[in-house]
């Protein structure tokens, strides 16, 4: 039984829907940039009137909304990282769990295929789908930025932002895959998966509000690929890259281990 093509075929429609929605939102947001850029003084005045907490939470005190990539980072990047992470974790958290909830695990285990190969094939499907999702969003948004730009922008920084969102989506996909291995019976994983993304997202916001809460950023993968840091330093910090690698490897290793030892009520 070829699991990989089956999973790609089953999940392609969701991939297209999520891509169209996020790309459409991105295009809708970015088309307003030229008119906003022409009213730079007014926009800066509006931004300065915002509550300090809002500016700190989203890093708006460090970037300019009249700069194309600053505007992109504050709007579309935030949307892609948040909702793309939701897509990734919902996709991965269902990969293994659905076989049990849909009562197809008995058929899978009766075939001449090991649990190791089942986990590997489904993991590869997740990586391919998340990669295609990010490549499509990156391509569409690059074309959009070129179309609306009023001045040249750094391709390097744009690609770093795209790489950051891809790494973030992979991280939540790995966490979701671990949740999928932990699932039992027909218990729905969607609430837990959404909670992981939303809680870590708000922890990231909270970490920016006060120096006393700065430690919370290490609990939020969103801060590992923070748009403001990427714009300012033009790189993804090595310590955060290390954390991303550790989280992904640990989640995947635990998924293999738990699935090998899992007892199924067949």
Image (cartoon, rainbow, N blue to C red):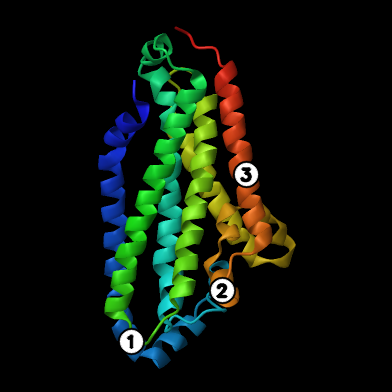
Which numbered disc covers residue 247?
3
Q: Quadrant of the C terminus?
A: top left
Q: Position of residue 151 (x, y in %)?
A: 37, 87
Report x, y in % for residue 58: 53, 68
Instruction: Indicate which disc, 2 or 1, sits on the residue closer to the N terminus.
Output: 1
Residue in the foreground of this view, choosing between 262 and 101: 262
Which label lies toward us, 2 or 1? 2
The crowding category of the residue bearing disc 1, from other C-alpha atoms within 10 Å (few below 14, some 14 to 19, many at least 20), is some
The residue tagged with tag 3: helix, strand or loop?
helix
Q: Which mark is residue 24?
A: none
Q: Which residue is mark 2?
A: 234
Where residue 144 appears, as percent x and y from the top left, is 29, 71
Q: Nearer the viewer, residue 37 or 137?
A: 137
Q: Residue at x 56, y 67 (%)?
A: 57
The residue under label 1 is: 150
**Above or below, 51 relative to 130:** below
Can I make out residue 96 in this image? yes
Q: Which quarter of the rendered picture does the N terminus lie within?
A: top left
The answer to which of marks 3 and 2 sits earlier in the sequence is: 2
Say what secondary structure mark 1 lies in: loop
State left or right for residue 238 relative to residue 33: right
With 88 as the anchor, is 245 left or right in this view? right
Residue at 51% over, 45% down: 172
What residue is drawn where x is 46% and y is 77%?
70
- Element carrying mark 2: loop
Closer to the N terminus: mark 3 or mark 1?
A: 1
Q: Quadrant of residue 6?
A: top left
Crowd class of label 3 (few under 14; some 14 to 19; many from 20; radius 10 Å): some
Image x and y of residue 18, in percent: 31, 49
Q: CA distance from mark 2 to mark 1?
A: 21 Å
């Amino acid at each position: 039984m070829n699991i990989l093509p089956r999973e790609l075929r089953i999940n392609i429609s969701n991939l297209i829907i999520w891509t169209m929605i996020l790309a459409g939102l991105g295009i809708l947001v970015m088309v307003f940039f030229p008119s906003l850029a022409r009213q730079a003084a007014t926009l800066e005045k509006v931004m300065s009137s915002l509550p300090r907490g809002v500016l700190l939470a989203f890093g708006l005190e460090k970037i300019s909304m009249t700069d194309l990539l600053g505007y992109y980072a504050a709007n579309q990047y935030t949307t892609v990282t948040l909702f793309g992470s939701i897509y990734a974790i919902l996709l991965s958290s269902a990969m293994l769990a659905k076989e049990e909830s849909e009562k197809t695990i008995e058929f899978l285990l009766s075939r001449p295929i090991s649990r190791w190969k089942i986990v590997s094939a489904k993991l590869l499907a997740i990586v391919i789908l998340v990669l295609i999702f990010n490549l499509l969003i990156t391509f569409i948004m690059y074309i959009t930025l070129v179309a609306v730009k009023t001045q040249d922008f750094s391709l390097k920084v744009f690609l770093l932002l795209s790489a950051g969102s891809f790494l973030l989506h992979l991280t939540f996909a790995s966490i979701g895959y671990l949740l999928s291995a932990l699932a039992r019976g027909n218990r729905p994983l969607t609430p837990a998966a959404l909670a992981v993304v939303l809680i870590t997202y708000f922890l990231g916001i909270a970490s920016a509000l006060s120096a006393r809460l700065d430690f919370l950023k290490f609990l939020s993968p969103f801060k590992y690929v923070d748009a403001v840091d990427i714009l300012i330093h033009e790189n993804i910090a090595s310590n955060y890259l290390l954390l991303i690698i550790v989280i992904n490897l640990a989640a995947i290793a635990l998924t293999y281990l738990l699935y090998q030892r899992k007892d199924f009520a067949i």
